[in-house]
Image: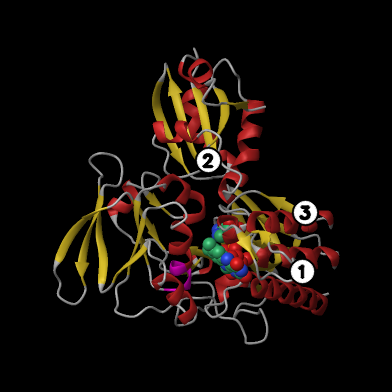
Amino acid sequence: MHNTIIIGSGPAGWTAAIYAARADLKPMVFEGYEPGGQLMTTTEVENFPGFEHGIQGPDLMSVMRKQAKRFETEIISAMVDSVKQIDGGFEVVSKGQTYQSKTVILSTGATARRLGLESEKALYGNGVSACATCDGFFFKGKNVIIVGGGDSAMEEATFLTRFAEKVFIVHRREEFRASKIMQERVKANSKIELILNSEVIEILGVDVGHVTGVKLRNTVSGETSEMNIDGVFASIGHEPNVALVKGLVDLDEKGYVKTIPGTSQTNIKGLFACGDVQDSRYRQAITAAGSGCMAALDVEKFLAGHE
Amino acid sequence: MAHIFTEANFQAEVLSSPVPVLVDFWAEWCGPCRVLGPIIEEIASEVDESKLKIGKVNVDQNAHLSTEHRVLSIPTMLIFKGGQEVGKIVGSMPKEELLAKLAPYLA
Ligand SMILES: Cc1cc2nc3c(=O)[nH]c(=O)nc-3n(C[C@H](O)[C@H](O)[C@H](O)COP(=O)(O)OP(=O)(O)OC[C@H]3O[C@@H](n4cnc5c(N)ncnc54)[C@H](O)[C@@H]3O)c2cc1C
C-alpha cells in the first residue's frame, strides 16, 4: 500500500510531492489531463516569489516537476477515474488499474468555465478559444469578443489587442467585477469596446465550420441582435474539479471541497485537499503551493499517528 | 524524431507524401503545445513511418501555413492524406488518447 497518492500536477500537487518525497513517503502523483495545471496556459507569471524578473508559467511548472522528481516521486501521466474508501485507506482507479494508498491528497485544481453552448462546442478550435495567450496570434487584424467582467477578462482583452483590430468585451451586467485599475486600463484602450448588459446566446458559423458571428441578447430589454465576429474567447471564471470526490467529501456552498480551516483535512480521515479545488477565495499559484505544503505535512503527521 | 515542416518543404513533405502525414502546429509561447511536444516526439519515434509520417510546423515561422489551413488554435494537429486534409485534432491530450485517435491510420 502506498503512503500517499497525489491527484493533480499544478503548483499544489507538485509542492505536496516535494514535501512528501523529502519526508521519505515516496509519493505517487497522477498528472491528469492537464499536466502542470492552469499555469501552462499563461505566459509571464510576475508574482511568484523567487523570480525577480518573472517566469513563464510552463517553465515554472517544468522546474516544479523536476524538483519533485529529483526526490523520488513516482509520476503517472494519467487521469484518476475514481477514488473510494477501503479498509485502512483508499482505492484509486486509473485506466483500469487499481492503486491502494493510506492517504490521498486531492489537488485537482479548477477548470475554466465554458459558455455552455452547443455552437461553442462545435466551433472549438475554429474561432472559439479557451486560451487567449495560445490563440490570440491567429486573430491578427481581426475582430474578437471576450466574454466576462473580471480581472482576467480585462487582462485577456488587453492582451488580445496586441493582435486583434478590435476587441469587444461582452458582459452580462452594467458594472464590471474587475479591479479599478484594470477597468481603467481597458477603458483607455482605443482598440477595446464594451458591450454591457449583454450575453452571447449563440455562436454563428457552425454551417461553414468557423466562427462568423454571435447572437447577443440584451439582459435588460431581452432584445436579441447579431454581430459579425471572427473569434470568441470566454473568461467567465473557474469551476473546481470535484467530480472525483462528489458524494465522498463535503463541499462548501460554492461547490469547493471543504477543509477544516487552517488545515488541509477534509471530513474524510486520510483525505486531504489543497490548491484551487478547496479555495474559492485566493486562487493563486503561491497559495496553491502553500496549501500543498500543508497537505504533505498533514499527511506526514497523520501517518505518524497511525504507526 | 518528428520532421520539421516549413513553408518551403510543405508541398513535397506533406501534400505530396505517399503516406498519411500528421502535422502538429505549435509555438514556443503556447503552454499546452509544450506539453504535447514531447508526446508527439515519442509517438514519432514509435510509429512505423511507412504508415504515418509525423512532423511539426512552428506557426511563428510559418504563419502562411496556419492561415492557409485555417488553424485558429494551437496545438492543432492536421492529418493529410493524398494532399487532402482528412482529420483535425485540437488541443493537448495524454499519449494514449492521441494514439486512440490516430489508430485508424496506424492499423
Ligand atoms: C490564464 C491564467 C493565468 C494565471 N496567472 C496567475 C499568476 O500570474 N499568478 C498566480 O499566482 N496565479 C495565476 N493563475 C492562477 C493559478 O494558475 C492557480 O491558482 C493554480 O494553478 C492552482 O493550482 P492547483 O495546483 O490548485 O491546480 P491547477 O493548476 O488547476 O492543476 C490541477 C491539476 O489537477 C489535475 N487533475 C484534475 N482532475 C484530475 C483527475 N481526475 N486525475 C488526475 N489529475 C487531475 C490536472 O491535470 C492538473 O494537473 C492563473 C490562472 C490562469 C488560468
Which residue is label 1 attached to?
A50
**Along the horizontal axis of the image, is B100 left or right of B69?**
right
Report if residue A82 is visible in the image: no
Q: Do labels 2 and 3 share a chain?
A: no
Residue with the most extreme bottom position = A261
Which residue is label 3 attached to?
A66
Which residue is label 2 attached to?
B97
Q: Where's residue B82, x and y in %?
A: 42, 16
Residue at 37%, 53% in the rendered image: A165
**Badge nearest the viewer, 2 or 1:** 1
Q: Quadrant of ligand 1?
A: bottom right
- Frontmost residue, A167 versus A49: A167
Secondary structure of the residue carrying tag 3 is helix
* Kind of residue at disc 2: Glu
Report if residue A224 is visible in the image: yes
* Kind of residue at disc 1: Gly
Secondary structure of the residue carrying tag 1 is loop
Q: Which chain carries label 2?
A: B
